[in-house]
Amino acid sequence: MPIINLKVSGNEDPSLAKELAKNISNLTKDVLNKRPEVTVVTISFIPDYLWFINSESLAELKQKSFHLTIKISDSTNLKDDKSKYIDTIHKLLKSSLGDIHPVSYTAIEEMKADAYGYEGLTIEYKIINNKIINNATK
């Protein structure tokens, strides 16, 4: 159910993208308890000369950067979980990319369960439906 969009500075690198997607998906499972089979990760590469911080390109700064956004269902994680996720993502990407600029962002967007879903069904519907099924099997 989470969708993760990662922008990474630098040239397109399919092997790095695959490694990042795997590691981010695993981290999302471990820290936020999200199911990998419904976790989507998209990765875009932005050339260093087109990524600017305070009007200076990363090419000029000789550093890397990233911007990760993740959409999850509202109120499914505690503040401590989200804080740990942001910290762990930063450490993972620093390890994978090298010298990253401090202005590298992670954003967790919490979506209302009645306004977010997959398979054409809202998360709210899936939660209610699962409760009905679980109660019927008891």
Image (tube, rainbow, N blue to C red):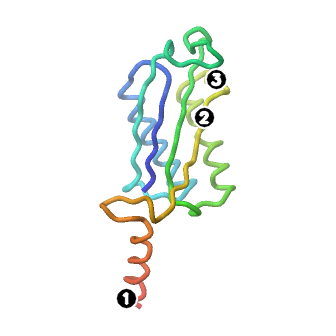
Q: Position of residue 115 (x, y in %)?
A: 44, 60
The numbered dot on residue 105 is 2
Residue named by callout 1: 137
Instruction: Give the vertical position of 51 relative to 83 (above or below).
Output: above
Query: Contact, CB < 8 Å: mark 3 with mark 2?
Result: no
Q: Residue furthest front?
A: 115
Q: Residue furthest left?
A: 119
- Which residue: 57% across, 13% down? 57
Q: Position of residue 44 (x, y in %)?
A: 41, 30
Instruction: Give the vertical position of 61 relative to 72 (above or below).
Output: above
Query: Contact, CB < 8 Å: mark 1 with mark 2?
Result: no
Please rate how many residues cluster around mark 1, counting C-alpha atoms within 10 Å: few if below 14, some from 14 to 19, many from 20: few
Residue named by callout 3: 101
Q: Is residue 8 left or right of 15 when viewed as pictured?
A: right
Q: Position of residue 118 (x, y in %)?
A: 35, 58
- Which residue: 39% across, 60% down? 117
Give the mark toward the camera: 3 or 2: 2
Please rate how many residues cluster around mark 3, counting C-alpha atoms within 10 Å: few if below 14, some from 14 to 19, many from 20: some
Assign the N terminus to one quadrant of the image.
bottom left
- Of 29 and 112, the residue lying toward us: 112
Instruction: Give the vertical position of 123 relative to 25 (above or below).
Output: below
